[in-house]
Amino acid sequence: MMTTTTTISQHDFYGDEDSETSVSVSVIENMKEEYGLFVWPCSVILAEYVWQHRSRFHGSSVLELGAGTSLPGLVAAKVGANVILTDDATKPEVLDNMRRVCELNKLNCNVMGLTWGVWDAPIFDLRPNIILGADVLYDSSAFDDLFATVSFLLQNSPDAVFITTYHNRSGHHLIEFLMVKWGLKCVQLRDGFSFLPSHKASVLSGNIQLVEIVLSSIKQQFV
Ligand SMILES: C[S@@+](CC[C@H](N)C(=O)[O-])C[C@H]1O[C@@H](n2cnc3c(N)ncnc32)[C@H](O)[C@@H]1O
C-alpha cells in the first residue's frame, strides 16, 4: 500500500473584536522530506506575532528568509504586506512548494532563491522594511552566513528590522556575540509563548524566543 506523506494544515488567526475578520492560511507539508517542508513551532509563533501586529505589517515590504512552508510571510501577505518569500537557492523542491502554497492561498508573493552568505545579483535590489526568519538559527555552523545576509540587507535599508523566532537551547551568548560582530543590536526580546493563544501553546513545546534586531551604530573590530 502506498502511504502519502503530503498533508495540508490549516492555520487560523482570530481578531479580538467581534467585527474583525479572521484569517486562515493553508500550508502544504511533506512529512518525509526537507526541513523546509514542515511548519515548525517557531513559524507558528512568528506568524501569530505578525497577525497580532498586523497594522505594522499592512503596506510594508516584507522579506522572509529560510521561509520553508512560509506561514509568517503568508500571514503578512494576508494583512496587506508586499511579500518576498526566500529559501536556499539549491532547494528547488522547497521553492516549488512555496509557489504552490501561494497559489493555494490565492496570494501573490514573490518567491526567490536566497542562500545565506551568497551574493547573487538579485540580493542587491532588495529593500525590505521588515525581514522575517522563523527557526533560521538552528545550525550554528550557518549562523555567520545568516547574520552576514541580515547585516547586508539592513545596511541596504537602514530603517529595516529583522524579526526572528528561535529555540533558545544554549543561552543567547553566541547570538549576542554574532550581533556585535555583524554590527547589529537587539531592540526587543520576548518569550514566544507569552503572546500565543492557549489553544496553540498547548500543542507546542520548547523555549522559543522572539527577537527583533536592527543595525547598531557601534562597530567593533574582531581579530
Ligand atoms: C528549520 S527550517 C524552518 C522553516 C520555516 N521557516 C519554519 O519555521 O517552518 C530552516 C529553513 O532554513 C532554510 N535554510 C537552511 N540553510 C539555508 C541557507 N544556507 N540559506 C537559505 N536558507 C536556508 C531551510 O531550507 C529551511 O527552509
Image (tube, grey):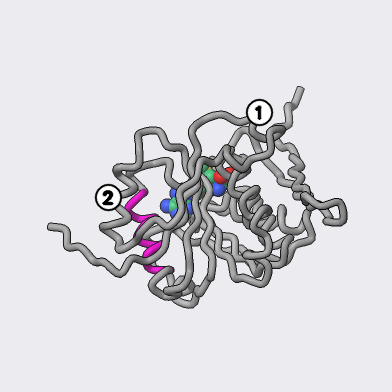
Earlier-in-chain disc, 2 versus 1? 2
Amino acid type, mark 2 = Phe
Give the image quarter of residue 59: bottom right
Residue 197 in picture, x, y percent from top left = 68, 38
Q: Is residue 137 visible?
A: yes
Label 2: which secondary element:
helix
Along the horizontal axis of the image, is 2 left or right of 129? right
The residue depicted at 68 percent of the width and 67 percent of the height is 58
Q: What is the spatial separation of the Cα atoms under label 2 and label 1, in whole angstroms?
A: 33 Å
- 192 in the magenta segment: no
- Give the residues in magenta: 143-153
Q: Residues within 10 Å of mark 1 (few under 14, many from 20)?
A: few
Q: Is residue 36 visible?
A: no
The answer to which of 20 and 223 lies nearer the viewer is 20
Label 1: which secondary element:
loop
Along the horizontal axis of the image, is 155 left or right of 136? left
**Looking at the image, residue 14 lies above or below residue 163:** above
Residue 82 in picture, x, y percent from top left = 65, 69
Q: Residue furthest right?
A: 19
Q: Main secondary structure of the magenta part?
A: helix
The residue depicted at 51 percent of the width and 62 percent of the height is 131
**Looking at the image, residue 121 lies above or below residue 98:** below
Residue 106 in picture, x, y percent from top left = 79, 60
Q: Which residue is mark 1?
A: 202
Q: Which residue is mark 2?
A: 177
Q: Is mark 2 within 8 Å of ligand 1?
A: no
The residue depicted at 76 percent of the width and 42 percent of the height is 10
Residue 188 in picture, x, y percent from top left = 46, 53
